[in-house]
Image (cartoon, helix red, strand yellow):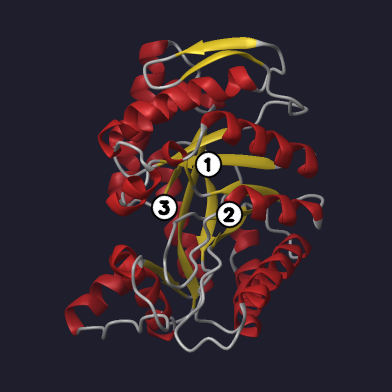
Amino acid sequence: MNLGFGLLSGQRAPDDPRSWEDVYRELIELTVHLERRGYTSVWTTEHHFVDDGYMPSLLVTSAAMAAVTSRIQIGTGVVLAPLHNPIRLAEDAATVELISQGRLLLGLGLGWSETEYAIFGVDITKRGSAMSEILQFLPKAWTGEPFTWDGDLYSYPELAVRPAPSGPIPLIVGGSVDAAARRAARYADGFFSNASPERFIAQVAAATEEMERIGRDPSSFRWIHYSVMYPGHRDEIIDQVWHQIWKYTDMEDSTTRGGPIARTAPLSDDMAERVRSRILGGSPEEIVHTIGTLRDRVGVPVEWVARSHFSDLHYGQQVELVDRLAQEVGPHLPAD
């Protein structure tokens, strides 16, 4: 089955009766269920200081997920790399790789929150340069051999990251602009995208052009596309998708907000149409047809991820959605 699942975020909804312990227990249980149902990968996602607890520690959670599974790939979608010390990031990723026995997909991205960058004391204007340097630093660190590093932003005396991972850790870049796709083409093993079809096609073209320029074989590159998938009428899930989208607009405000988790803003008619357009819905046959058409248009092998984890679905409802996608959609997706 060419289908992954995410993005697991550890969020609670307004008036959610669960404790934080309940939330993370359910995430681990869901990961076990995803493996049992044949999903190829499970993905987490990072933000900080949000009132609903949006997951801040992806590699900690990834290690817990890896410890209770044996086959499913554990992907980070994405670690906000410039907010992390490169040595600490290399060590933590190597540890997860060892616990998972080679199943970690280290997805890295830039993020966009000025609040996060300010609190971590990182210059947001240099985030692109930081990403490029980290992507080059990590494979060097994972050799397990002593080395020195003297880059534009990071400088370290002779050191060795140990224990080293048992093998190469795939580096996946996430982003929305062509520059991110080109950076991935130069320094990474793949790209993680939730772009619209037209933007995804442009990203593939930009990365392919860059690989041709530097003499890299594009066939070695992994394309991973994620989108909300729902086998049913879009309006059945529109409130959950709206809450997911709206929360991003509330994140920075929630940093200093006390009290209960903020309630989602009302969904206007105009916004409802925009939200519906973000949902890959309809019958299972329609979903499979839409994905197959996109695969034909981009002209490259693609791994598909259903971004169908919602913080305001009860666990039983979430499992039901997982099962429906696994039974009705996953087995019928193009397998490259």
Alpha carbon distance from label 1 to label 2: 9 Å
Alpha carbon distance from label 3 to label 1: 26 Å
Front tag of 3 and 1: 1
Q: Amino acid at mark 2?
A: Trp
The numbered disc on residue 83 is none
Q: Earlier in the sequence, mark 3 or mark 1?
A: 1
Q: Is residue 133 above or below residue 33?
A: above
Element under disc 1: strand
| Displayed quadrant of residue 145 | top right
Q: Is residue 165 left or right of residue 108?
A: right
Badge 2, how many Cα within 10 Å: few under 14, some, many 20+? many
Q: Amino acid at mark 3?
A: Thr
Residue 159 vs residue 45, the one in the foreground = 159
Badge 3, how many Cα within 10 Å: few under 14, some, many 20+? few
The x, y position of residue 189, in whole percent, is 54, 29
The x, y position of residue 254, in whole percent, is 34, 70
Q: Which residue is mark 3?
A: 293
Q: Earlier in the sequence, mark 2 or mark 3?
A: 2
Q: Which residue is mark 2?
A: 43
Residue 97 vs residue 90, the one in the foreground = 90
Q: Which residue is mark 1?
A: 107
Badge 1, how many Cα within 10 Å: few under 14, some, many 20+? many
Q: Amino acid at mark 1?
A: Gly
Question: Residue at point 53% right, 52% down?
Answer: 304
Element under disc 3: helix
Residue 131 vs residue 334, the one in the foreground = 131
